Image (tube, rainbow, N blue to C red):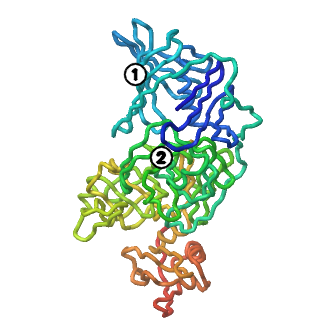
Amino acid sequence: MREIALGPDSFAELRSPGGASKGQTYALGESGSLAWMRVGDRDPVEIDGDVVRQERTYAAVLGLRFARPEPGDRLEIESCAPDSCTMAFVPRGGQTLWIDVDRKTNAPVSLQWIDAHRAVQSCGALTWTDDRSAIASAVCTAIVDHLGSTTITWKLEERLIASAVPAWAHVSRGDVRPLIEPLAPAEFAIADPSQRVLVPVSVGAAAPMDLVVDSGSSMTILTHRLANAMGVVAAPDAPVHVRPPWLPEDTYDSVLVDRMTIGTLELHGVPALVVHDDAPFSGSEAGLLGTDVFAHYVVDVDSPERTLRIWPRDVFQAPAGAVRLRGGDQRGSVTVGGAVDEIGPMALVLDTGAPINVIVGGSRMHVLHPRERGNDASLTWAEQDVSPDYLTEVGGLHFGPFGFPKMPAYSRDRQNDRLFGPLADGGALVGMGILRHFRIAFDLRAGFVHVVPGASYRVLRRLGVEIDDRDGVATITRVVGQDRAWRPTFREGDVVRAVNGRSVGLRADALSALASARGPTVEIAFERSGNPATRTITIGED
């Protein structure tokens, strides 16, 4: 049930779970320049962003504000047919509302808008109060990503003209928890740069739980165990039906979070989606922190320093030596230019939520590197009789100006209708297996990604090896098959002990020493199966 309070310069809405459904009653509103949200008995919070834009659209619908545009609103005739005209109304700071008006009666006959989850919502079969100053009933339908629709019929039960504001609709600025712009970044340790980056997030009144920092997800997604917290409430938007490439097909419920805290940062009125099936997020992961939240900040994934920094946009400065790539948000994906050497230029999706090197799509990939017997590799959550994915190898990859040698690569030659964005159009998805070699700062609002190569990238380019910490020592975990004189020298599992006579312990020490080594050769002392050895090898080009 939704109760609405309208004034000349105010709008407030009380949302209550109806019938047998469980949930929390909450209110949202705007009075003058203050937009707010209050859940139950919790303190009201100031809100902005998509929630406010959507509320202004609801006010335009329910308060008929499109009939009385105010300063800052925009109303235009978009098109006309013999029987009706379509008008586009944009309330100040709101979303576009399209109104079909009957040319004979001058009365609106239908309304359409696009909600926060890109669902097309429309209301028709409009009836009016006797004085025609308010909509008495409507049949509203939401079409979700061409996959289906939901229909809601609503009716105005009672309409009162009152001078007093209902208690639930009244807030004073002094009682509202304000939005405060932070002055410094929130910093978090990255446990393993080759895996998913996790960040502790407090949602509503819940204790902090780990969300995956996922530049491959356009929306923030929560598990049921996290969404049951006080302060997480059902939104009126239609459910979102999804068919992700590697997760189960599911329907996600729309919710609002009154307060989301990420270290020293706090967001208010955050839209999110809640999965029906928690199983893919078992363990410590309680959901995904998507690019909808990224866009509020600059998200700085510094894998070489094992540090995640989330910067206020006004505070962030690009790191010295950074390469700035145009990082457009294409259909919900952070996308930059790149290439697979034997295929050619393509768009690359940067996915911090994928603990892999690369997935390459498109028919040319399937022709040059087809599925062969024995190379099935299931990346999907649910086991299937025949995996849609397989593992092969590409001859090299370019991520912007940064080149990589031969590497393992996944591809998919079945269920391609579940792929998204550039990956569905013959592009590639680059995961943390590659991104871990860089410091990458995502400034999505500006449309850029700032990239600084780390020591591990230089070592891979110069020596053709990757080094990780295994059992507390710097261990070679990959040797690139290139035609160099030193190729037979190393094997996976070799432990690096010294570089040019300087002892090294962990991965960071070994990478720093190898990346800074000068001259045409470098001397490396290592241990293989407990046996010490020393080799002098030729350094390749950076």
Between residue 518 and residue 6, name the one nearer to us: 6
Between residue 44 and residue 517, name the one nearer to us: 44
Picture coordinates of residue 354 (x, y %)? 45, 60
Picture coordinates of residue 224 (x, y %)? 50, 53
Q: Residue at x 67, y 37 (%)?
A: 46
Q: Residue at x 43, y 59 (%)?
A: 280
Q: Residue at x 42, y 18 (%)?
A: 126
Q: Which mark is residue 416?
A: none
In this rendering, the label closer to the viewer, 2 or 1: 1
Furthest residue toward front:
20
Q: Is residue 324 visible?
A: yes
Q: CA distance from mark 2 to mark 1?
A: 30 Å
Q: Which mark is residue 124?
A: 1
Quadrant in the picture for residue 93: top right
Q: Is residue 59 positioned above or below 315 on the image?
A: above
Between residue 263 and residue 344, name the one nearer to us: 263
Sequence order check, earlier mark of 2 and 1: 1
Q: Amino acid at mark 1?
A: Gly
Write down the residue under mark 2. 218
Picture coordinates of residue 127 (x, y %)? 44, 16
